[in-house]
Each structure stands twice: as structure tokens, then as C-alpha cells.
Image (spheres, grey):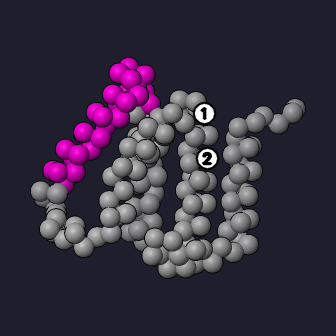
């Protein structure tokens, strides 16, 4: 149950963050706001680490070098979310982002990419994605009256 609550919090936080970051970029610039946002995130991460950290940085050598790309992807995510929200608005941008996330996750699961357990890409998942795309189209385009 906690995982569901955490997923809801993450989704809401990502939507707010995208709006905040986009508004900030209107004032100081896209890449400037990215640096500021990532810097604040780094400082907050250090504070959380000090109070709650239980891991071991010396074990980073045991991790796959590919796993270190997560940090670089944070920059890609922040910048592209700002650009998408600026061009599409929050609702449509987040909707398309969610569809892209679900499709990518389904491909990772279906093929067992990145050493993940294989989970079949069933017709229900395909139907779910089609329904989501249809939902975005209903949000984006006005039906004739």
C-alpha cells in the first residue's frame, strides 16, 4: 500500500515540479533554471543523506557503469519536461510523458532489458496504451459541436 501512496506522491510532485521549473525558466532561462533546480536537488539530497542515509558509497564500484546514467538522465528529464510544458501546457505534456513512460516500461519488462524480469506485453497493456492515447486526443482536440 505504501508503494501506491509513494507513486501518487511522485506523480503529483513531478507535475508540480514541471510547472515550477517551466515558470522559473521564463524568468532566468532554460539551462540556467536547470542548473539551479539540479543544484537545489543536490543540496536537498545531501541533507536527506545526512539524516537517513544507510548505504555505502564505496560499493559504487560493484554497480554497473550503465546504472550511473541515472544522474545524466535527470538533466534530460528536467530540460525536456520544461520544453514540453512550455509548448503543450501541463495537462497534455504530462499525459504524453506518462504514455511514453508506460510504453518504455512495458518494452523494458517485455524484453527483460537492463536485467529486469521479463513480464509479457499483453493485449491488455496494448489496449491500455491505446485508451490513454485516445484520452490525450480527447483532452487536446475539441470535438465538433
Q: Nearer the viewer, residue 61 or 100?
A: 61
Mark 2 or mark 1, earlier in chain: 1
At 67% from the left and 68% from the top, the residue drawn is 125
Report the magenta stretch's main SS. helix
The label on residue 88 is 1
Judge the density around disc 2: few (<14), some (14-19), many (≥20) Cα neighbours within 10 Å. Answer: some
The C terminus is located in which quarter? top right
Where residue 55 sits in the image (x, y, percent)? 18, 69
Please give left or right for residue 129 compared with residue 53 in the image.
right
At 32% from the left and 64% from the top, the residue drawn is 65
Judge the density around disc 1: few (<14), some (14-19), many (≥20) Cα neighbours within 10 Å. Answer: some
Mark 2 lies on residue:
96
At 70% from the left and 41% from the top, the residue drawn is 139
* Secondary element at image label 2: helix
Residue 19 vs 103, above or below: the answer is above
* Secondary element at image label 1: helix
Q: Is residue 29 magenta?
A: yes
Q: Quadrant of residue 33?
A: top left
Residues at marks 2 and 1, CA–CA distance in whole angstroms:
10 Å
Q: Is residue 40 magenta?
A: yes
Q: Are marks 2 and 1 in contact (CB under 8 Å)?
A: yes
The N terminus is located in which quarter? bottom left
At 49% from the left and 39% from the top, the residue drawn is 80
Q: Which residues are magenta?
A: 22-48
Q: Quadrant of residue 9?
A: bottom left
Where residue 51 sits in the image (x, y, percent)? 13, 58
Please give left or right for residue 136 compared with residue 50 in the image.
right
The label on residue 121 is none
Please give left or right for residue 84 compared with residue 54 in the image.
right
Residue 92 vs 130, above or below: the answer is above
Residue 104 vs 95, above or below: the answer is below
Amino acid at each position: 500500500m505504501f508503494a501506491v501512496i509513494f507513486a501518487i506522491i511522485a506523480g503529483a510532485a513531478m507535475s508540480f515540479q514541471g510547472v515550477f521549473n517551466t515558470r522559473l525558466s521564463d524568468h532566468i532561462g532554460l539551462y540556467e533554471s536547470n542548473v539551479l533546480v539540479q543544484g537545489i536537488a543536490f543540496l536537498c539530497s545531501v541533507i536527506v543523506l545526512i539524516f537517513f542515509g544507510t548505504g555505502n558509497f564505496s560499493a559504487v564500484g560493484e554497480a554497473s557503469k550503465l546504472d550511473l546514467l541515472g544522474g545524466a538522465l535527470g538533466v534530460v528529464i528536467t530540460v525536456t519536461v520544461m520544453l514540453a510544458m512550455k509548448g503543450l501546457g501541463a495537462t497534455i505534456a504530462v499525459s504524453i510523458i506518462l504514455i511514453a513512460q508506460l510504453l518504455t516500461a512495458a518494452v523494458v519488462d517485455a524484453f527483460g532489458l537492463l536485467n529486469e524480469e521479463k513480464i509479457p506485453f499483453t493485449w491488455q497493456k496494448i489496449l491500455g496504451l491505446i485508451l490513454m492515447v485516445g484520452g490525450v486526443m480527447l483532452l487536446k482536440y475539441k470535438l465538433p459541436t
